[in-house]
Image (tube, grey):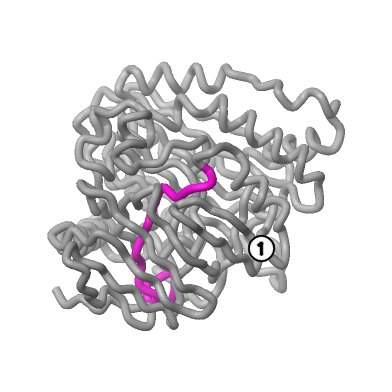
Amino acid sequence: MTGKTHQEMLAKYAEAIVKVGLNIRAGQRLIITAAGTRGVPNQFAPLVREIAKAAYGIGANYVDAIFADEEMLRLRVQHAPKDSFGEYSKWQIQGIMDMIENGDALLSIGGSNPDLLGGLDPDVVGRMQRTHLENWSAVSEKVTTNAINWCVVAAAGEAWAHKIFPDLPLAKAQDKLWQAIFETTRIDQPDPIEAWNKHIAALRERALYLQSKQYTALHYKGPGTDFTLGLPSGHLWISAQSMAQNGVAFTANMPTEEVFTLPDRNRADGVISATFPLSYGGTLIEDFQVHFENGRIVKVTAKKGEAALQKLVDTDEGSHRLGEVALVPASSPIGKRGHLFYNTLFDENASCHIAIGRAYRFTLAGGTELNDDEFIAAGGNVSLNHVDFMIGSPQMDIDGITKDGKREPVMRQGEWAISL
């Protein structure tokens, strides 16, 4: 691909994560969470170590890593007492919150098995997931308000690679997934940092245009979709880079191709059809539709995984409503690859998407200063969940609705209808 060894590419990836994703400052500490698959949690250790070297290289004071074996979740659902799913170990949360309160940085490395909890009792899985969300909410609140510089990236887990490329031997599937990760995060470019800076600038220009329009709603029309989504007064269109409350500009997702904001939690009407499967909590949900009335999800259907989808919606009142709307052209670098990743970090950057649940406070003017009731009154949504699912396609048209009721083309056949 580039003439460089895998280890050299890992080092370039780590440098981009540290300098672009997290934008680590001298004196900061960094905590890394990494969940492994097939009982091999340390398969991500080579990347974690390169990240540690890169972070120390620019003056980080301390780098710590929490490795987890996600297979333990499956074993728990299969074998733990059915009345034990309110139990939770809080030491990780306490450690992460300590670093957040200190203004330090947080990195999450994902590479989950999309089928980890498939075929298991959805009621038990749902109880386990709810307990996690309830306990993790303190961290989630800090992330959704951009309290610190944070980033989510991926590593080529074995089970994940096998899911994407099932016809290849495992080692070759993993190599191919690493190649895809490097390409979609611009690590294969001669100067990945400069490539990222140009990409961030282009996304910012798109977001500034949408910000200037201040549409009151978006209307989606496509196969199985006829949907109107309101946008609250004061909504902010955000692109790749954000400013954390600790004063650090960071890029939360690598890869990223989206511009996004929050919808009005009370104004969503019609039906939306998912265009990609959703991997949620180790269950794959396929061919599903979501019906809305007055902002609330009133019905879901799915050919596969419907019980898991309903459990997601029933998590709390906020999970019956939406917290994010994102626009992505179908011809994005990930969209053009022509295959699913079965991972939201990637698939959401192949397609327009919306998110069930919690809204990011920083997508509303003054939102980070509001309490829950004030945020809800302004149209924002509060929930334990934030789960993206993909709705865009080359057949999707989107109109922006102005304050005087006029319609303007925003996307046509999955592509931008806006010239900048």
Task: Kindly indicate the quadrant of the structure image that contains residue 148.
Answer: top left
| Residue 49 visible, this angle | no
Q: Quadrant of the N terminus?
A: bottom left
Viewer-proximal residue among 310 and 152: 310
Q: Residue at x 22, y 48 (%)?
A: 233
Find residue 293 and report its horizontal and vertical position in percent. Answer: 49, 57
| Residue 367 visible, this angle | yes
Find residue 251 and report its horizontal and vertical position in percent. Answer: 30, 47
Q: Quadrant of the C terminus?
A: bottom left
Viewer-proximal residue among 361 and 112: 361
Residue at the disc numbered 1: 301
Magenta stretch, residue numbers:
319-336
Q: Residue at x 55, y 67 (%)?
A: 274
Whether 289 is drawn above or below 11: the answer is: below
Whether 255 is drawn above or below 252: the answer is: below
Find residue 222 and report its horizontal and vertical position in percent. Answer: 46, 79
